[in-house]
Amino acid sequence: MSTLSERILDAPAGTYVDREVDLAFAHDGTGILAREALREMGVERLAHPERLRLIFDHIVPANTGMAATLQAELREYARTTGVALSDAGGGICHQVLSEGVVRPGTIVAGADSHSCTLGALGAFATGMGATDMAAIWASGATWFRVPETIAVCLSGRLSGAADPKDVALTYAAKLGMEGATYRALEFVGDGVADISMDGRLTLCNMAVETGAKTGLFYADGVTLRHLADHGVAASPQAPEECRYEQEIDIDLSDIVPLVAVPHRVDTVCEAEEVAGTHIDQVFVGTCTNGRYDDLFRFAEIVRGRRVAVRTLVIPASRAVLARAIATGILADIVDAGCMVATPGCGPCLGAHAGVLGEGEVCLSTANRNFKNRMGVGGEIYLSSAVTAAASALAGEIAVPEVA
Amino acid sequence: MQGVGPAICLGRDIDTDQIIAGRYLRTKDRSVWAEHVLEDLDPTLAERVRGAIIVAGRNMGCGSSREQAVVALREAGVVGVVAPSFARIFFRNAINIGLPVIEAPVPPCTDGVRVSFDLDAGWVEVDGKRYPARPLSAKMNAILRAGGLVPYWRSHR
């Protein structure tokens, strides 16, 4: 019997296979390198342009003439090759592709490390470099080593201020930054049924922070309803009895708000232990926590109040932004004194739109708090949008309280 | 495939942000990445890695998939990278651009000690002590020997 990765890749763990890729994408950062590699390879015709996507999200809109020129080159490349382009403002690649593009059971390769996010839909989705991506665009296929699987067994139910992000930080702390290298994480157990698609995307997103090749949920009722909302019909995937290399248990009822402290994703403590820590900026967004659930929970807390520190909210996609406008929560966020910026990665990788100065501290809902990532000399704490909201109001790290 | 050079020793969990920072990514000019390689870790490293072999701790190259990280190391003149374990995207990227990466149970070392490797014979030597190198898959081996995925592609089409 097989793990979900073995089933989708159709081979046992540990074997090397060549497989056609159902969906392959790059963003404005990696796309330009893939374009260069294709030029050096002498490739003029792409094998399956209909399976490819270019998604501008890393520096949108362009912040310098150089960034604009590189994006213009990619835009022209998309036009001449027929590759579908999601231009600046459409949103983060992983989010855009979760909105009715990726299907359960498919093989997805992205030129971005957080491509594992899309395993939330029951796909085998993994990140690669730009030259690997160029070869996929040229040939339609690539090689994989079928990963062994670590089961993350979820039981119980989240309550109060606890959030799927806190579950992600929990497994990151348990496994450590290389605890799952070359492995897949499979999220299983009675607890998964209560986790929304937004929460599942958060959980799969951080798989790579433990070194994992991907994170996966089996497609179930939550998946099918999510896809149906985007006009896509799909079938569920039933888990089989299978052999996991390792199992870790997480009781969701025990989860409380957590924070990863600088400069490692796996140095995690209860928010209470770092409450009162000075912060200069709060950033709510990214492929980890810029989704509607995150903005909704953030807005529930800041509604009718004022943030005490500069706070940046960046929806993960245009669809998220539009929904936040339609339901009125964006007005709550703006009225609370937050800045709202173009859907995309924002300052997560330290290239634009909210980078930190020397000695500044940011509480961010992103997935990485590596030294200097958001700016030289800056420090990054990671939390859920719920903890970010309480902290934005307090002007320091604070423990959220949700009835 | 063989290489020899003085060691540049790095710690564990060296992420790709430290190898090349996000603020330097928006260019196609590879010399920019070489000039700023490992800058946030130690600004003198960009000069010192030329002709050297990096001996890193566990989980070398974790984090972002940015291929600029391995290109920066190669363009800066790094001969090879040795570590007890690598993050998978970094490892694959290095092979794809023809930069030798060697997984071997090497302990932490001191800058400047002599490092050599012989991938055909399957070993790496650090300061006179020999360690077994984990063999590459047949495909990765072929790609590395071709000088990377681009030349491999050109010779296989």
Image (tube, rainbow, N blue to C red):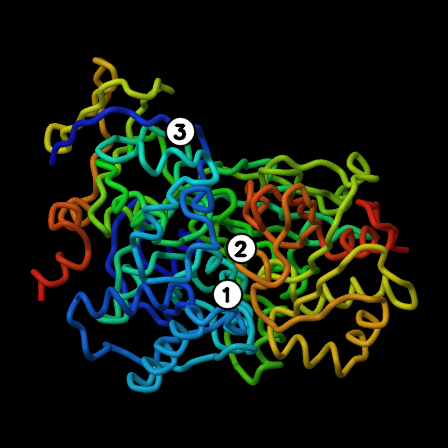
Quarter placement of the C terminus of chain A:
bottom right
Residue A306 position, x and y percent, is 89, 62
Write down the quadrant of residue A385 in the picture. Answer: bottom right
Which numbered dot is residue A349? Answer: 2
Badge 3, how many Cα within 10 Å: few under 14, some, many 20+?
some
Chain under label 1?
A: A
Along the viewing direction, whichever of B16 and B44 lies nearer the viewer = B44
Dot placed on the residue nearer the N-terminal end, 1 or 2: 1
In front of the other: A160 or A45? A45
**Amino acid at dot 2:** Leu
* Residue position marked by numbered label 3 in the rendering: B10
Pointers 1 and 2 in contact (C-beta within 8 Å): yes
Q: Would residue B151 be found to the left or right of residue A122 on screen?
A: left
Which one is nearer the viewer's eye here, A17 or A279?
A279
The Cα atoms of the two marked residues, 1 and 2, are separated by 8 Å
Mark number displayed over residue A58: 1
Three-letter residue code for mark 3: Leu
Distance between the alpha carbons at the discs numbered 3 and 2: 22 Å
Residue A60, image x, y percentages: 53, 71
In the rendered image, residue B125, in percent from the top left (x then y), is placed at 21, 20
Label 1: how many residues lie within 10 Å, few (<14), some (14-19) or many (20+)? many
Q: Is residue A201 visible?
A: no
